[in-house]
Image: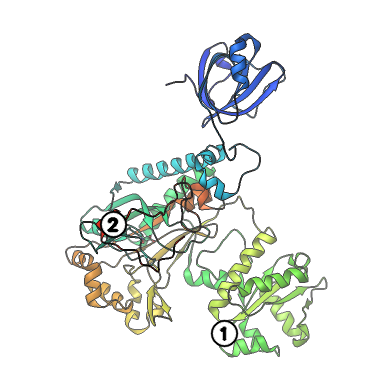
Amino acid sequence: MLRSHTCGQLRASHVDQEVTLCGWVDTARDHGGTLFIDLRDRYGKTQVVFAPEAGQAVLDESRKLRSEDVVRVTGKVAHRPEGTTNLKLGTGEIELRVKKLELLNKCQNAPFFPTAMEQPGEDLRLTYRYLDLRRPEMQQVLKLRSDIIIEMRNYFAENNFIDVETPILGRSTPEGARDYLVPSRVHNGLFYALPQSPQLYKQILMVAGYDRYVQVARCFRDEDLRADRQPEFTQLDLEMSFVTHEDVINIIDGLMQRMAKKFLNLDLKLPLPRMSWDEAMERFGHDAPDLRYGCELIDCTDIAATVDFRVFRETADAGKKVRGICAPGGAAFYSRKLIDELTEFVKQFEAKGLAWFRVEPDGKLWSPVSKNFTEEQLAKFKERVQAKPGDIIFFVADTWAVSCKALHNLRKKIGVDLKLYDPKSMNFSWIVEFPMFEFDKEENRWNSMHHPFTAPRPQDVPMLDSDPGKARAVAYDLVINGSEAGGGTIRIHDQATQSKVFGLLGIDAETAKNRFGFLLDALQMGAPPHGGIALGIDRIVMLFGNLDSIREVIAFPKTQKATDLMTGAPNLVETKQLRELGIKIAETATKT
Ligand code: ASP
């Protein structure tokens, strides 16, 4: 090594030792004749002193040092002078008094300095990611990510799982997103698809008798990117044989308990709470509710059916829903202007409007539309949503689906606006028994809610024929703080049920044979009952690190437009490469 210690290592016990450190110049301060620099590496910072005793030559060289230069310094460890120790820093009791300075590399033209007080915009951070990754915060996060993955791997190894790698160049898999395709040079005109997940391979591994499989797997989905999506992301992927959903959930419960203790010093009580999808949608309007606070959706359709207020009554008469949410203490917070903003906000989610009622100090409800209601009716609404003086109640009158979407988002906003929870707190739970299918109006057929290999609950199998929309799946999602942290299912392990589900999804026998023939064959050659789950590692690190974006936990993330600003990917390639692949770019291709 070019160094004897790291920049985070030296303590009072090292005083009088001669040491060599290497690192980046963090800051430099010239105190008339003596220069102080903070030398930084990923382990910490050490105060390095260039005093006259080092000799004029070293002193002259030291004056040329600038932030982010890379240096090697040799000298003696000394106590810091009385009154100048810094207890916030591990190395705060000592300093290094330099005898020898070696400039290993100059930093030229840095567009920003990683430890500057103000962070540059995200585009600049991603373009010069190596500077950004020098920031101690980024280094801590990537270390947390590494520690989390090590912990996961250890846990699964201790529980008898085998780590198996599955192909990146494969066949299109069925998670329902668009595939990334890779053209074949050897077989012009044919394509590999990058895996949306190792789903089919892991099921095949169960048929092959591997019993407990795990992998930290990269997955690729060519979707329009939302805030916490990336075109490539990492899953902790696992599959188990001869299990029920209880076994899979238990294994993940155990992992969460261990990780919460280790990384958050939090004692999780097991089993983690579970809620059915039906209940989650009824109470929160969403399948990944944030359970750190209440403020639930309350169905008031029956009361709405009795009132003169047209919007309410007609909605109820049409078999739609009038659901409300009570924002505790919100009457003072939500001014008319803010309520107008909330009304615009819910329109994004297709709601036509937002009715609101303030609970006055005397306990009566007041609203611009209150004259359309009798006192008794108002009292009934108030009682139903359990509102108290100072609260404000919002109602959405619409289809069940729109009321779910609009009120879920409204609930999230109210939670933040009224600070209804501690943003540092953590909540873990399961949502179970999802519907097997959702109806796709455009395509006029069913879509799987998870993926086509999900098993129905045994008691719901007859519904596949009679009422597929009612059939519930043996499916489970892990939800942390209102974020889907993972999801899995028990799989169909017999060919007949699998073919029936394909039929409902509009995949005819021919297409099924073409796309998944190998799986259907395998299911007929001794497939054990099996099931599994995948956890989103990026999202879990984000949640455990209390961060807002998964780009903060990925070393080299893509932008919202799926580009890599540092390397410039995606990029044009040589005509020769295209020729080898038998590909010609269409005239109409949009050039950027
Ligand atoms: N393959 C699924 C996914 O990526 C997870 C699973 O069912 O195990 O969402």
Whether residue 433 is visible to the viewer of this picture, yes or no, is yes
The label number, if any, that marks residue 578 in the structure image: none
**Above/below status of 299 relative to 233:** below
Residue closest to the eye, 285 or 339 = 339
Tell me what residue is drawn at x 59 percent, y 40 percent: 112
Q: Residues within 10 Å of mark 2 (few under 14, many from 20)?
A: many
Q: How many marks?
A: 2
Q: Which comes sooner in the sequence, label 2 or label 1?
A: 2
Tell me what residue is drawn at x 56 percent, y 70 percent: 283
Find out if the beta carbon at label 2 lies less than 8 Å from the nearest ligand 1 atom: yes
**Above/below status of 462 relative to 476:** below
Identify the amino acid type marked 1.
Lys
Whether residue 495 is visible to the viewer of this picture, yes or no, is no
Residue closest to the eye, 456 or 221 = 221
Identify the amino acid type marked 2.
Lys
Tell me what residue is drawn at x 72 percent, y 71 percent: 339
